[in-house]
Amino acid sequence: MTASGPACRACERRGPELVQLGGGAFDHLVALAGNPNTGKSTVFNALTGLRQHTGNWPGKTVTRAEGTFEREGARYRLVDLPGTYSLQAASADEEVARDFLLFGRPDVTVVVVDATHLERNLNLVLQILEITDRVVVCLNLMDEARRHGVLVDPARLSDQLGVPVVPAVARRGEGIRQLVDVVERVARGEVTPTPFRVRRHEPEVERAVASLERALRAAWPDLSNARWIALRLLDADERIEQSIREGELAALGAGEGASPIDPDAVEGVLEQAGRLRWTLTPDFHDRLMAGLYREAERIAGVALRARPGSGAAEFNRTLDRLLTSRWLGFPIMLAVLTVVFWLTIAGANVPSQRLADFLIEFAHPVLKHAAAAVGMPGWLDGLLLDGVYLATAWVVSVMLPPMAIFFPLFTLLEDFGYLPRVAFNLDALFRRTGAHGKQALTMCMGFGCNAAGVVATRVIDSPRERLIAIITNNFSLCNGRWPTQILMATIFLGALVPAHLAGLVSAGAVVGIALLGVAFMFATSWALSRTMLKGEASAFSLELPPYRPPRVLQTLYTSLIDRTLIVLWRAVVFAAPAGAVIWLIANVRVGDASLAAWAVHALDPVGLVLGLNGVVLLAYVVAIPANEIVIPTVLMLTVLLAGLPEVGAGAGVMFELETAGAVGGLLRAGGWTLLTGLNLMLFSLLHNPCSTTLYTIYRETRSAKWTAVAGTLPLALGVVVCFLVAQVWRLAVG
Amino acid sequence: MGPGSALIAFVVGVVVLVAVAWPRRGVWPRLRRALRLSERVRLEDALKHLYLGEHEQAARSIESLAGVLEVSRSRVVALLGRLEEIGLARAGAAGIELTEDGRRYALRIIRTHRLWERYLADETSLAPAEWHDAAEVREHTLSESEVERLAARMGHPLYDPHGDPIPTAGGDLPPVRGVLLTALEPGQRGTVVHVEDEPPAVFAQLVAVGFTPLARVEVLERSESAVRVRVDGQEGTVAPVVAAQVTLDPLPEAAGDEDAGATMADLAPGESATVVRISSHCQGRQRRRLLDLGLVPGTRVRAELDSALHDPVGYRIRGALIALRRRQAELIHVRRAGGAT
């Protein structure tokens, strides 16, 4: 079987949903569906390894992952559908999954089922069986089920469902080979499943369905799923209606010999569906779901063998009661978070220093020598090496170590199952401000990196709560801003107290700023839910999965690779150009002063009103891409404008000094006061999100409006707060 | 500029901003409202009320129109004249009558109004008291294609949140069915079909007692001055004139005590129950999610985990531990495992 022949014919049959992400031709198309939290991604990774691509479904904000695997010379393209509980097309995720199954016409659909929660998972399986025949059930998490005393008999389940069932423990790789075997046999037609279909609805429903089915068959004799389509029309399914109108459905049924669409027939059928809908009770949808669950219960009842009380269930319950208890719940949470933060800060110190030493102290001069040896013109050398390279190196050395520690730790907590309990505990607080408990988690992620926090909001599937979490994520003090905060606190606030208290006071000040950020987050969430986001859609649900022993090494490894790649990508894409801009503004002269001097001069009055100065403002403007380079830029500009050629490394070259004391001396020489330091801390907390975050927000929301809000709201707050603090300070202190 | 003057300037700026931008009462919103009340809007409102008058067999006089539209009598006469000119209404024997075109136009407005109310009720968190006003504005600004898309996306709902039928695109409108609440004897039950949404004060009272389409009502007591009812398990009392604003679909005697009186929120930790049904107050996305998780009638649930702040609570539903907020748990009617309510 060559890769070109059958694939091309197959492609013709498929609808426009099938926009390939790349990867070449294939012989068979396999869809991967399932509830959320069933280990579907583990199955996906096990099948495709590194041969996967991610992107977006056309026109939607839902991520799409595709991969390939080969078996006996045939190539299989695997499409990972979003995890959904149902296929009623009530949310973007469900729409995407349903559309693909219907119009993408996969050769085989693999449904990943969580053996521990069979009934609920069967709801989706039954719905999928209504659409397509060629289904293979992958009964995953068998080890967990066994631990909880749940024993599922795959053979009996397969009997009841009429499709092959393959037991698996995906995270240990068990059952994957058998799964591929079965998929191959179904794809080749060696095994033809005869799926169970829910047929016994209530009499009035059956009457309506039969009548509509007749009309459908009269209009399109070759329609294969008339009964299912009739049910969907009676449930007022928009997508199905649209596909009937546009002839997509007709084309599916007839294949090559499609008869032309008769608009009168189409309208007739749709009108009849509308009239029949009048005769059904308003809770039609409820009854459909009840019917589905009745069948799911029955089937599960046959497939499940007696479940004795198990040790794992007891352990779960005890642990849960401990972690969510009145007295211990919060202290434990605080303790865990403190440990995570402490490990991050303490652990990142030395690696950051080493990276900086290598990239900046060592590699930079080497590159400069090389450039000189090659005879590179001074300006190019400066632009590329002093501007672009330095900025990138800075971002990498500051960002990489903390992120490489923070995120793997978080992923471990998530794997273990602790994070939903945190959301569970804190939900009451968030509910009062109109948000979702899971915002606690995205807020914590934001302390690592705001862009990651925004991506993490995908776990919040209620649109309004998700927007609130996205817009307020910036108030979490991200890793890139910690150095600025610590430095300012040490120089200006620590200097106010005797030396033995200085460390404590500085640390306290930084924690204070972080907590202030949390307070702003709550306040803004409250305000948003009362004003701009008042009328947006909203729904709450939170599942507490059972605790799983985390795969420590595996998680650390994958998380490390993930995070490293993202940081490097970001450094190159966003920080590098910023570096170029910084070098240019310092070295391009207009008239008798550099661009930087002009800009600072222009911004000084504004800066003064805000209790800052022109240097700070300019630094923030050029450092929109990356908060890490604010301080080096500030130092460079201060030196440039104060005309101190013996300090620093030249015009446009960012640098840092050895001790906080030295930095302090330099800044004070540049006119900085305690107010400036304090307001810099406030402004650092409250300014607009960095460009990576803004870009991520746009990608996640697909809305220019909300991206603009997310960008300007914190900035406006920052300006107002700094303004007020400055005026009050000057009034009070003089 | 010294700090003192800067602060004063700031405060003045904030005050001005508030005065201009305050929702509803600020200068800008008032301006926008005045501009919106263009002639077309008034004409459409007039058409709508004329149609509703026809439909409910209550003649609409110039006085009633003037009252509803909040304009002077002479203005109403001018509006009617304009409608006649365009061919949407005419002066008939029994007063002002709509032409066929007028009826069709009015139905479109009503369709948009009710669809928008349904959208607000199902998909947003707007309070019931605000639906009508919001729809009153929207009915004039949505285009026909937008309306069709909205209807399709919501699954062509049949009734608005008050129970009024939503006209189809083709103009079908089944008559309002059912009997008034005041016509039921004590002990009789019914399902709410329609709740009159005007005047707003009365509607607010009805909502407070729990009257909403699909709610189960049992009449407990009826006297000259009050009607005592149990609505979805909750007891309440209303005046007869208020009760007359509710229309019910009577249930046969042997309907069984499905209300049970208890909700999931009433379960103590460790207590089990069987789901009877999800309250009609829970609609749209939220209801679908609950159904997806398996909360259909007959499902066994158990309250298992109380959170640190007592809200949400974790329930064991079909093997999974699902956390629900108190507000949602109160909308799920259950029958306690012990048998007692």
Image (spheres, coloured by chain):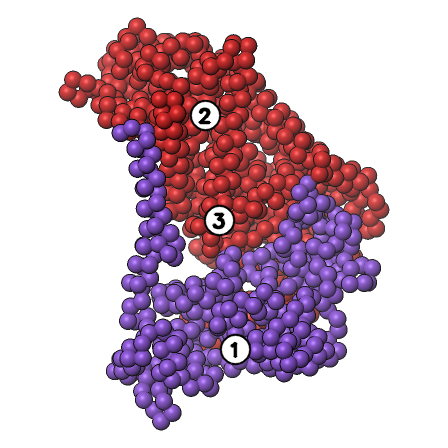
> Pointer 1 indicates a residue of which chain?
A
Label 1: which residue?
A275
Residue at image coords 58%, 28%: A408
For badge 2, the amino acid type reads: Arg
Where is A241 relative to A672, above or below? below
Dot 3, crowdedness within 10 Å: few (<14), some or many (≥20)? Answer: many
Dot 1, crowdedness within 10 Å: few (<14), some or many (≥20)? Answer: some
Q: Label 1 vs label 2: CA separation?
A: 62 Å
Tag in front: 2 or 3: 3
Tell me which label, 1 or 2, sits earlier in the chain. Answer: 1
Tell me which label, 2 or 3, sits earlier in the chain. Answer: 2
Label 3: which residue?
A529
Q: Is residue A217 left or right of residue B110?
A: right
Label 3 SS: helix
**Disc number for residue A481:** 2
Tell me which label, 1 or 3, sits earlier in the chain. Answer: 1
Looking at the picture, how far across and down is residue B153, in whole percent?
47, 62
For badge 3, the amino acid type reads: Ser
Looking at the picture, how far across and down is residue A140, in whole percent?
69, 44
Q: For chain B, give the colour.
A: purple
> Pointer 3 indicates a residue of which chain?
A
Tag in front: 1 or 2: 2
Q: Same subunit under labels 1 and 3? A: yes
Q: For chain A, give the colour.
A: red
